[in-house]
Amino acid sequence: MTEACEYFPPRLRGQVAVITGAARGLGRAYALRLARLGADIVVNDINLASAADVNEPLSADTVMDEIRHLGRQALGVTADVSSEADVQRMFDEIFATFPHVDILVNNAGGGRGGNSVTECSAEAWDAIINKNLRSTFLCCRAVAPQMRERRRGKIINVSSVVGLRPIMPVLAPYAAAKAGIIQLTRTLALELAPYGVNVNAIAPSYVTTVNWMGGLGKIQEELVPHIPMGRLGQPEDCAKVIEFLATDLSDFVTGQVISVDGGMGHLNPYYLGQAYR
């Protein structure tokens, strides 16, 4: 069944979801999926027009317009979520527009560079840690108090398979940041569980997006034969898991990390990194 004719039960009607890094790629897929389920959406990005930078086709002028065409409210907020001041400003704007936030998806992150511990500069290390781990912490801290007070909410953090186990090459700062997100998820889940707030994470592997590593042919040739399910991930593979964690389907699930990797977690770390060489 194609996405166009897929039925989306309105499980999130009346709810508000904030997705960071949502102007393109995986974040956009999460935003559209939750909008189809009935949620009003806050689209955050450091550049709300970034889809054009990578020639990612949209069905409307912006992701916010795509969401509005689905019959949902949409708010776009430009902010660097690794900045404490920007995060405070963003949530001030959100709460001035919506009475509450029901779902937070911490998707902003990424970054390659300074692969090895011994060769990584302190500046490169800090930049990647801040972009991934610090941003997740700041957004969790900003939204948690009102979720705790309302005794409901879903926080979904985006880690990576490299946060669960090393690959070759080691991608040291990125792996450390994504591993930190996993432990942040688990500790915050314990903190908020008594208040009915669920905190979980997903750990995607290789997912094909428009701006995806620039070497899809090489990736497919060298990596796909070692993936048990025989293909690379698609954005909707991750978005469907986000749906599970954002809806009442996961009401008794917290502190968990769900790998979205086609069985890749069972591979030898050597094979996981061959496409980078």
Image: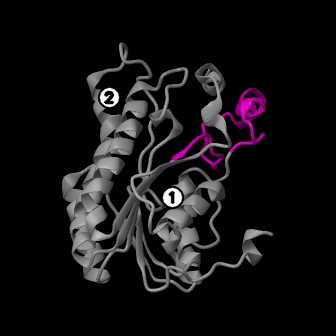
Residue at image position (64%, 78%) is 8
Q: Which residue reaches farthest top?
A: 118
Image coordinates for residue 20, horizontal then vertical, percent? 41, 59
Residue span colored magenta: 203-232
- Amino acid at dot 2: Trp
Name the residue that disc number 2 marks. 125
As displayed, is residue 226 above or below residue 253? above
Q: Considering depth in this image, is 164 or 2 the residue closer to the camera?
A: 164
Does the rendering let one see residue 62? no
Q: Quadrant of residue 41?
A: bottom left
Describe the element under mark 2 as helix, strand or loop: helix
Q: Position of residue 125 (x, y in %)?
A: 32, 29
Viewer can see residue 247: yes
- In this view, the residue in front, 109 or 200, is 200
- Horizontally, residue 268 falls left or right of residue 167, namely right
Q: Is residue 274 above or below residue 5?
A: above
Q: The residue tagged with tag 1: helix, strand or loop? A: helix
Q: Residue furthest right?
A: 1
Disc 2 crowd, CA 10 A, few/some/many (<14, 14-19, 20+) = some
* Residue occupied by mark 1: 27
**Viewer-nearest residue: 202 or 234:** 202
